[in-house]
Amino acid sequence: MGAQIARSVQFFPVRLARAFARATRVLAYAVVVTAVLGFFGLKSVRGQIGEKTFGLGREMAPFMDLLSGTHRVVLNGEPLYVASAVTAQPMSVVLDRFEAQCRAHTGGLVEELDALPATAKAEVARRAPTAWNERSGVWREERETEGSITCVERSDGHGLTDTVQALKTFMATGDVHALGNFRYVYVRPTDHGKTHVLSTFTEGEFNVFKVIGRGAKEPAGTDPAETPRLPDASRMVSAEVDGDMYGTYIFASSAPVEQALGFYEVQLPAHGWKYVVGHSDIGVQVWQRDGVTMVVNAVRPDGDDKTRLTFSQGRTVAARGSK
């Protein structure tokens, strides 16, 4: 029974954090494809981004019920939002609505291209049909059982010149907001004839370079509170949902599993954590402190020379001193 409790406590935040980590990789890829490759109309990337966006949606789909409403996620120090809802509208109608929203906010690019003389438009369409068809930067994939929309919305801008400058700024800084706000929507039918809608989006600054740790020892982010690091550990992922309600932090260390768990058996009580249960066969410990339950999971993947340490936290009561 104790092992089942440990597994259930860690399941939601661990899987969710890994899904968000994957979301960041897909976001970085999708932004580049939408803004760069999509602009030049490379037909070969359409299938690639379609599969990646579907894969992201499928990975996050198990959390649709748990993520009802809108949640703020700080992923490796950068904020984005995740929302989940159910609607009676069919998938195609939902996708149409999001596509219309994306196409209405292209920063003037589509309007400028559509204003070209008819002969010029016909020549561009003949020479680069994919580039012309994808000029809005909206990537829509729809199948019988699922669908997705990916785009970058720009509320302001003056067409091609601004788009090129924004692209240069993004490539130099990694800030998605230089291009606009990223939008990703995944839909699939429910068992009751409705449509489940899962969306991930940014509002304002979201620096991809910081999230992936470009030019740094590790990505930006935070460590779990009152939880010391193993001396040689490096942080791979930190994801915090709705402030301090949920948090997951993943580290890599050369320490063997037994040594890593032994380190925390000694260190965590000194920081106010109370030991609840542990199961060495699955490398799991459960601790509690000030209304927070934390699961520590240590595992050495086959063929890997690093132990993966995952700290999954969930708050069950308000912190001391809060109203």
Image (spheres, rainbow, N blue to C red):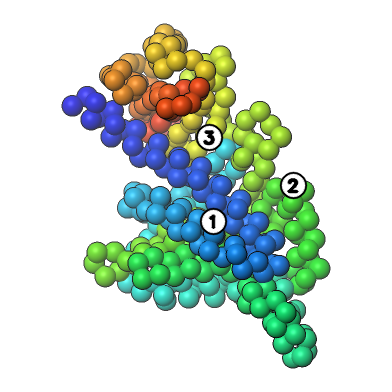
Quadrant (top left/top right/bottom left/bottom right) for the C terminus? top left
Q: Residues within 10 Å of mark 1 (few under 14, many from 20)?
A: many
Left or right, 207 with respect to 164, comes to: left
Q: Secondary structure at mark 1?
A: strand
Please report the residue visible at 22 percent of the width from the left and 24 percent of the height from the top.
2
In the image, 81 versus 176, the foreground residue is 176
Amino acid type at circle 2 is Thr
Q: In the rendered view, does 190 fall on the left or right side of 267?
A: left
Mark 1, residue position: 201
Residue 311 percent coordinates (x, y): 43, 27
Can the viewer see residue 321 in this picture?
A: no
Q: Residue at x 45, y 40 (%)?
A: 18
Mark found first going from the N terminus, 2 or 3: 2
Local SS, label 2: helix
Q: Which tag, 1 or 2, sits closer to the chain's start?
A: 2
- From the viewer's perspective, is 190 left or right of 29? left
Identify the image quadrant of residue 294. Answer: top left
> Residue 142 location in percent, x, y?
44, 70
The earlier-in-sequence mark between 3 and 1 is 1
Give the residue drawn at x 57%, y 16%. Answer: 232
Type of amino acid under label 1: Phe
| Residues at marks 2 and 3, CA–CA distance in whole angstroms | 21 Å
Q: Name the residue beneath numbered marker 2.
A: 173
Q: Residue 9 in the image: state x and y as whole percent.
A: 31, 33
> Does the residue at mark 2 contact the one at mark 3 (Cβ under 8 Å)?
no
Report the Cα–Cα distance between label 1 and label 2. Answer: 19 Å
Residue picked out by circle 3: 237
Give the residue at the far front of this rendering.
303
Q: Residues within 10 Å of mark 2 (few under 14, many from 20)?
A: some
Q: Is residue 26 above or below residue 288?
A: below
